[in-house]
Amino acid sequence: MSKVCQVTGRKAVVGNNVSHSKRRTKRKFLPNLFNKKYYLPEEKRWVSLKISAAGMRLINKKGLTNALKEAKEKGYIVNY
């Protein structure tokens, strides 16, 4: 499974390691991902999501169903 948040769409970005002598080498900045289960009371089932810390805060703010609906509209999640 790829390292992409299913709620916010955050993924790895590329940047540079910069040494003391200012020499630059490529590196990846990975998102802060977690495998987490949430309960959907409307469907009476559990869903497993790979979400970032920002995605968890978004779910706490908007609610699980709204966050999943927006993620599906934006194409971050195919089915949950």
Image: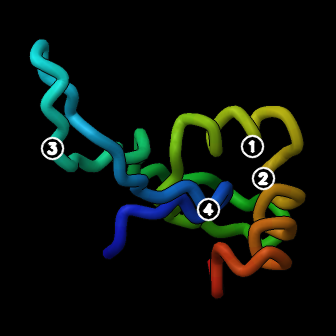
The location of residue 6, given as percent across then percent down, is: 58, 64
Residue flagged by tag 4: what amino acid is it? Gly
The location of residue 79, given as percent across then percent down, is: 64, 85
Residue flagged by tag 3: what amino acid is it? Thr
- Secondary structure category for the residue under label 4: loop
Q: Is residue 20 left or right of residue 71?
A: left
**Label 4 Cα crowd, 10 Å radius (few <14 / some 14-19 / many 20+):** some
What's the distance in space between the residues labelled 4 and 1, CA to CA?
Answer: 14 Å
User: Between disc 4 and disc 2, whose residue precedes?
Assistant: 4
Q: Which dot marks residue 25?
A: 3
User: Between disc 3 and disc 1, whose residue precedes?
Assistant: 3
What's the distance in space between the residues labelled 2 and 3, CA to CA?
Answer: 40 Å
In the rendered view, tell whether residue 53 sits above or below residue 74. Answer: above
**Label 2 Cα crowd, 10 Å radius (few <14 / some 14-19 / many 20+):** some
Determine which residue is flagged by label 2. 64
Determine which residue is flagged by label 4. 9
Residue flagged by tag 1: what amino acid is it? Ile
Labels 3 & 4 near each other (Cβ < 8 A): no
Q: Is residue 3 left or right of residue 78?
A: left
Labels 2 & 3 near each other (Cβ < 8 A): no
Given residues 17 and 70, the one toward you in this image is 17
- Secondary structure category for the residue under label 1: helix
At 88% from the left and 42% from the top, the residue drawn is 62
What's the distance in space between the residues labelled 3 and 1, CA to CA?
Answer: 36 Å
What's the distance in space between the residues labelled 3 and 4, CA to CA?
Answer: 26 Å
- Secondary structure category for the residue under label 3: strand
Given residues 65 and 23, the one toward you in this image is 23
In the rendered view, tell whether residue 69 sits above or below residue 12. Answer: below
